[in-house]
Image: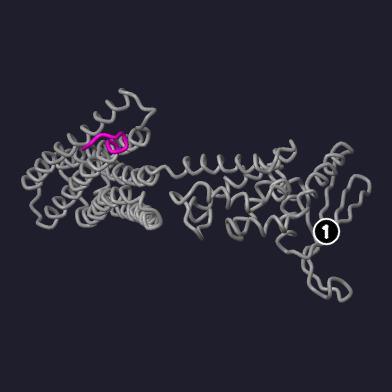
Amino acid sequence: MLVAQVEGLVLTLTYSDLHRQRFGFFQELLSQIGAKWSAVGSRMTEALNSGDAYYVGTAAFECADEAALHKALQGLGARIVFLIDWNRARKRLRQIVGKAGSIAVLNECARREIGHRGWLEAGGETLIFAAMEAVGSDYFRIGDTLDAVMGAASAREFLVEALAASSLAMQQHQPVSRIADSIRLLLIRHIRRHHDEFALLSEHASFCHALAEGIRDAIAHGHERSTKDAEKLARRAKAWERQADLLVMSSRERAERNPRWLPFTRLIERADDIADAMEEAAFLFSLIAENHNKGWPGDVREGMRQLAEKTLQATQDHVKLLVIASGLGEGSDASDHEEFIAVSWRVLNAEQQCDQLLRDVRRLLVRNIDDAATLGLGTDFAAALESATDALLATAYGIRDLAFSRLGAGT
């Protein structure tokens, strides 16, 4: 029930609803256009709703002039329409993206002024399930929900666009079969956008890059003399490494659903050795700071800096390699192929240079450090950085093989 009253320049709406979720939805909608709510709560009246609880509140718009009052009335009218069949739409969407996802989709649709009734009239959830079935087992298995396969955010984004397309098509009196085709193509575009096989690898590579950059910067700022700064880096590195691990787990789950993901899962597992080595280096750096407050001698720091810099450059090329590899295919040209080869070889050269830099650092440590613990920690730290470049090289070979197979070339 909605009762609107205008007294002077004040518009007041008393609103009651049996459904708490729909009440909260409408409450938020009006708050977005300046409504001030009061007396909000649940009530029970024996003569109403068979004594069941209902929700009620009062929204007030205090307007500065008549123009503002007219705007408030228009805003109220434009939002009341979203209450029509709202609960039915929520229940239909809930089958696709769950309880929270269904409300999020309806909230976003209302914010964009996209109606949900066109989607309901065109078939609602059957449109989506038919599109999922048409896309096939390469992406969806029987029993899969949209958000489980695409991710919550991507699934919600797709549904908002699907509701918008349905609404427009129904307004244009298009046949339901044509709407179904549009939804199917929309789903394919979203899957390709959000499920490129290299997406998880690229996200994982960004954490490897963050780890390498953090270590390089720590050395540049002399944080081996600061326990506080070094421990902060170690905590951040651990968090990044855990996030990288989650991506590996996500890839494994995809491979369990669909064997097509298996080569990429093997590759991201190999790439995870990069993150593990970098996180170990950050931990060792914190131990160095804890036990060596005087810092490294100049020659030692410069050797460490060069090793960390070269490792960072290799992770940057790792990121570039994945970007190029993801674009290789029928639409790529000779320049793309040449750039891919060039970046691959830069990773190879970086690994070889880091082998030599590690030996140089060890020599400098032996010459300049007398304390056995400091010597050992410094050697282990440098070795961890070099191990990261070994893993980068192994991963680069894996990316190369995968890219060549996509191009139809042997390895």
Question: Does the image show residue 239?
Answer: no
> Where is residue 352 drawn, in percent x and y?
14, 37
> Where is residue 350 drawn, in percent x and y?
19, 36
The quadrant of the picture occupied by the N terminus is bottom right
| Of the pair 129 and 346, the residue shown nearer to us | 129
Rendered residue at 7%/44% (across/down): 363
Is-magenta flag for residue 405? yes
317 left or right of 124 in image: left
Is-magenta flag for residue 282? no
> Where is residue 144 drawn, in percent x and y?
50, 58
| Of the pair 323 and 73, the residue shown nearer to us | 323
| Of the pair 350 and 10, the residue shown nearer to us | 350
| Residue numbers of the magenta segment | 403-411
Mark 1 sits on what residue? 15
Rendered residue at 17%/39% (across/down): 351
84 left or right of 325 in image: right
> Where is residue 52 drawn, in percent x and y?
80, 73
Mark 1: amino acid: Tyr
Question: Does the image show residue 227?
Answer: yes
Helix or strand or loop: what does disc 1 sit on? strand
Q: Quadrant of residue 301?
A: top left
229 left or right of 359 in image: right
| Of the pair 252 and 25, the residue shown nearer to us | 252
Rendered residue at 9%/43% (across/down): 359
The quadrant of the picture occupied by the C terminus is top left
Rendered residue at 36%/36% (across/down): 326
Mark 1 crowd level (few <14, some 14–19, many ≥20, 10 Å Cα): some
